[in-house]
Structure formats: C-alpha cells, structure tokens
Image: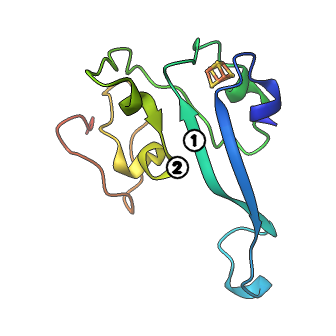
Amino acid sequence: MCAAACPSDCIYIEAEQDARPYSERIGRDERYAKVYNIDYGRCIFCGYCVEACPKDAITHGYNFEISVFNRADLLKRKEDLLITNQKQSKNYRVALSSEVVDSEYKEV
Ligand code: SF4
C-alpha cells in the first residue's frame, strides 16, 4: 500500500511467503517484505506512505539532515530502516525496554 501511495515511486518491495508454521510467527501475516527499499534521493517527504500503512509500520521522524556525499547512500534498505538500528531523536517515541537503540539520542 505504501508503494502504491508513493507519488515519486521511491519505495521498492519484494514480498515473500513466511514459510514458518503459524505458531512460530511473530506476527500473524503469511507474507512479509523480504526486500524493502526507500530511495531518499527521490523521496519528497510527503508522508503518504505513513498514512497508507495499515500496520503503522512506517514513521518519519525528525531526521531532516540526511545529506550524504554519495547519492547511492540515500538508498535505504530494510535493515537500515528498522528503528532499532537508527539513532533516535529525543522527539521520537521512547524506545521499548526490549529494544536496543543508540543511547546518545534516546530520551529517558
Ligand atoms: S514520504 Fe517519500 S517514500 Fe513516503 S510516499 Fe512520500 S515520497 Fe514516497
């Protein structure tokens, strides 16, 4: 849904079936995003993807300075986008106790 809502066509998703038995899945869904890329070189930060997500899986924080020297570095993979791998702004939600975050930016 997020990729369909994106006006600049910068979200790329490859879905895959979750082969695990139902009881072993973390979520209930049978399909998951094997590949999830956002090209921030094309993103216009409109927020349509955030609005379109039925699972509230996408949020845009306050990281407005994503300048890089290499344009290819603006392509963020799923592993880059997972919140536990990002530095958190103090304006962002407080991390759950089970999450590992960079404490430099964590509001306590
Ligand atoms: S915020 Fe960026 S990624 Fe999301 S829909 Fe808008 S252009 Fe696409």
Q: Residue at x 75, y 65 (%)?
A: 16
Q: Residue at x 47, y 34 (%)?
A: 75
> CB of mark 2 within 8 Å of CB of mark 1?
yes
Q: Position of residue 66 (x, y in %)?
A: 34, 20
Callout 2: CB less than 8 Å from ligand 1 = no
Q: Amino acid at mark 2?
A: Lys
Question: Which type of secondary structure does the marked residue at label 1 adopt?
Answer: strand
Mark sitting earlier along the chain (2/1): 1
Relative to 7, does residue 28 appear above or below in the rendering? below
Q: How many marks?
A: 2
Relative to 54, does residue 85 appear above or below in the rendering? below
Q: Position of residue 95 (x, y in %)?
A: 39, 46
Residue pointed to by mark 2: 78
Question: Which type of secondary structure does the marked residue at label 2 adopt?
Answer: helix
Relative to 96, does residue 57 appear above or below in the rendering? above
Residue pointed to by mark 1: 37
Can you say which quadrant of the picture contains the C terminus? top left
Marks 2 and 1, how far apart in space?
A: 6 Å
Q: Is residue 45 left or right of residue 4?
A: left
Residue 63, quarter of picture = top left
Q: Which mark is residue 12?
A: none
Q: Nearer the viewer, residue 68 or 107?
A: 68
Q: Is residue 3 left or right of residue 80?
A: right
Where in the image, quadrant-wise, is ligand 1 located? Answer: top right
Residue 17, quarter of picture = bottom right
Crowd tier of the residue under label 2, counting other residues whose Cα lies within 10 Å: few below 14, some 14–19, many 20 or above: some
